[in-house]
Amino acid sequence: MDRVASYKEDLRLVRKWPEKLLAGILFLALCLLPQFGSDYAIYIVTLISTYAIGVLGQNLLIGFSGQVSFGQAGFLGIGAFTLAHLTRAGVVFPLALLAAGAMAALFGLLVGFPALRLKGPYLAVATLGFGIAVYQVLANWDTLSGGRMGLAIPPLAWNGLSKRLLMYYLNVGLAVLFTLATYNLVSSYVGRAFIAIRDSDIAAEVMGINLTRYKLLAFAVSSFYTGVQGGLLAQLLGHLEPQMFTLAETITLIVGVVVGGLARVEGSLFGAAFVILVPQVFASSRELVPVVYGAAILLVIIFEPHGFAGRWMKFRLYFSHWPFR
């Protein structure tokens, strides 16, 4: 019974009273923000929630399963333009968003096949080629991308809520849902199989783990997350152009994973906040943003390998038995 109790305790998202207090404050702040926050603050939190879903998916692939991918911008564009075309055709938003994730997951399966034989930099180059190919297709196929004018997405409206508030509640709610789903996934047999493959695929295969199945599943699930992020981003921005889905978007997601914390679900949330807030802080000097990203990665690798999530873990352990040390 003690083992069962300790295992359940270990899986809890919020464990000790300091964490419960912080979670309560965060929940209260999210509830009060639409009433008392500025439009700019609401937009930033909405954008962070959107990117949190994509960083969670990238963390599942890189952090938990050990598969390096530089093609996430391609999946992001596939999800975004899938939702754009479906909503313009009159498909209701929930189905269009689900289709955006499913389409990205389908391409994720196709891209995942090289992962069965390629590793490390070879896999990274293969996925990078996919991302560049998607961008080139969108940039040169006006029927898909809308050409120089791009594509406009019909705005959402529901129950008298403005688009600003509707997207806030929708994106924050989906970010919470995907966070809880990721916690359950990584603590399940599938998550343990991902980790075993990351640590040693040969040992995992000897233990009876089907490498083909779980490597492809990792790519599909990660791509689904990214496709949903692309759909939400398209609906939030209201307009799409191929130039929005270059290698820079892939780098942004990778920075979020590394700085937030590899193989840490809560680290994905910290990483998403980081990659959104840094460009806002340096809005008047945009050329400094890549410098800050690079410096942050170096500092994390040298001083805090587990990223912001590692620092949060130390903070949590420090106060776990407060005031006794």
Image (cartoon, rainbow, N blue to C red):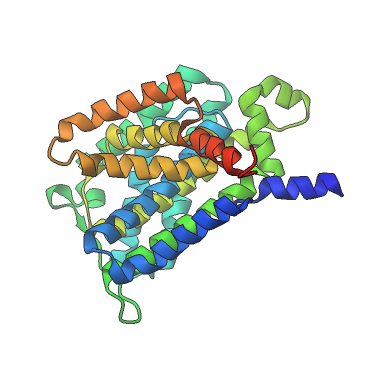
Q: Position of residue 195 (x, y in %)?
A: 64, 32
Q: In the image as oriented, which residue stretches furthest toward the right? A: 1
Residue 27 shows in the view: yes
Q: Quadrant of the C terminus?
A: top right
Q: Position of residue 254 (x, y in %)?
A: 40, 33
Q: Nearer the viewer, residue 130 or 267?
A: 267
Q: Is residue 210 left or right of residue 322?
A: right
To which quarter of the image does residue 277 belong? top left
Q: In the image as oriented, which residue stretches furthest toward the bottom? A: 159
Residue drawn at (71%, 49%) of the image: 9
Residue drawn at (41%, 54%) of the image: 100
Residue drawn at (29%, 61%) of the image: 42
Q: In the image as oriented, which residue stretches furthest toward the front? A: 323
Q: Nearer the viewer, residue 18 or 308?
A: 18
Q: Nearer the viewer, residue 54 or 150?
A: 54
Q: Position of residue 180 (x, y in %)?
A: 57, 54
Residue drawn at (30%, 81%) of the image: 160
On screen, residue 50 above or below 129: below
Q: Is residue 219 left or right of residue 196?
A: left
